[in-house]
Image: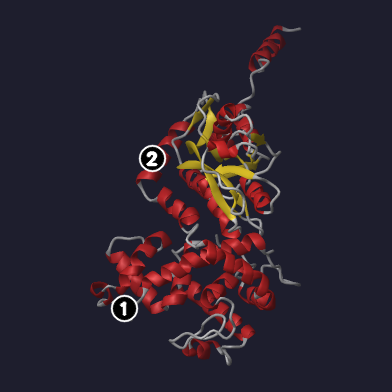
Amino acid sequence: MPALLWLIALLSLAACTPGEPSRIADYRALGELRVATREDAISYRIEAGGETSGFEHDLLLELGARLEVPVRFIVYPDASRALDAVLNGEVHLAAAGLARNARLPLRWSAPLREVDYVLAGRAEAPAIDNEADLAGRTVSVRRSTVAVEALTRLRKRLPQLNLHFPARADDRALLEQLADGKLDLVATDRAHFALAAQAYPALTIAYDLPVQSAIAWALPHDARDTLAAEIDIFLQEAREGTLLARLADRYFAHVRRLTDADIARFLARIRERLPRYRKHFQEAQARTGIDWRFLAALAYQESQWDALATSRTGVRGLMMLTAETADRLGVVDRLDPRESILGGARYYAMLRDQLPDDILEPDRSWIALAAYNLGPGHMNGARAVAARLGKDNTAWWEMKIVLPLLARPEYAARLKAGPARGGEAVIMTENIRNYHGILARLEAPYVPPLQPPGFAQGRSID
């Protein structure tokens, strides 16, 4: 063999040393940031319409914008496989609701959020007052979580405790099975429990596990590029600025605002009242492009799905329209369910479309909800107040701080529309976010028949 070919062969062997995984190219050379993730109710979720969202998903999109590369999410069946993808050099990092684990040969980012862990159970199950009460109980838990370590230590002290490791089940699926009576106890973090309890009020925190952790991103331990340093700077700025606070508000702040009684009543009325109005909400979606479940959540907050509802101020019907608004929309009978729903949907769509272009989703939808309650004049006044106070009047998390000020004389005096109960608008909006989240999990999306190409489809807001 010629000397040149021998040299090429030797170099090839050196580059492919057995046992050494090939390393993914630098994100700049590759032209994209590849991220291993898994489907999860908090970190990365795929909505019914196919769009993706989530706390870590949105944060990574912001990172990609900073790095000036698109982010490509590669979905793995569980957290262990996502971590393997980092260890095997297949991705640049893993972001999958991962708790920092110093025992793994990985480099961890700064914490994104702190978490604590609980045992979730059902309200009718025997109470757990101390460790001894766990004897004979079975705890289901995802593998590769901090909770596994705590439960393993607990079982050494309490051998009668049974541990169950379901295959490829995320927290949401485990909590749903728990609510259905198929599982005894589930170890999860408090945020996942709160989300599940929105739809299953019979769930309860049975026991607080003595463990806390931090969610972080996992990178290769021997990173040879500047990505780790870029992430450190990005997260520090996100923490010192408003980005982390804004995303936390978007995904966590409204959770558990409703009481258990509120949720139980809502679930009962989904069964008892919603069926008679579902077709009207779906028709409203076909006409406006707004997810029918979002419109149904708005209507429930307004009237509890009572077509004859009437307030002391004269607003009436399922969507609680004023006489003036009904006249403007051409609604002849506010107590007619179809007329009310179609009119209310058009009114909400009009309020949302009238907002300035720099208010982006989902804040745009939430600010429009508050305007539905307050009226556009008061919302414009509130945005002016926010600007004077140095607040971001395009962000809901800032506006919900400002809106209650409209009831105070020193602020109301500056409003053309006079004082307003802005605090009630905040509560209404946050409640609708909760109701919509429950409906989005329990009710199927609607695709209008014979929908023409390019027609707006109902999109999940949260």
Measured along the vertical axis of the image, is residue 54 above or below residue 344? above
How many other residues sit within 10 Å of disc 1, few (<14), some (14-19) or many (≥20)? some
Name the residue nearer the viewer: 361 or 343: 343
Q: Which amino acid is tagged 2?
A: Gln
**Is there CB contact under 8 Å for labels 1 and 2?**
no
Tell me the element at label 2. Answer: helix
Check the picture and name the quadrant holding the N terminus: top right
Determine which of the numbered discs, if any, sits on residue 236 in the image. 2
Q: Quadrant of residue 341?
A: bottom right
Question: Viewer-nearest of labels 1 and 2?
Answer: 1
Q: Position of residue 176 (x, y in %)?
A: 66, 52
**Residue 52 screen position, x and y as percent:** 60, 53
Residue at figure coordinates x 63%, y 42% from the top left: 38
Q: Relative to 371, does residue 311 appear above or below in the rendering?
A: below
Q: Which mark is residue 290?
A: none
Q: Nearer the viewer, residue 197 or 404?
A: 197
Q: Could you tell whether 239 is left or right of 325 in the image?
A: left
Residue 181 in the image: x percent, y percent?
69, 51
Q: Label 1: which residue?
A: 419
Which is more toward the observer, 172 or 319?
172
| Kind of residue sitting beneath label 1 | Pro
Residue 109: give x, y in percent of width and height. 47, 34
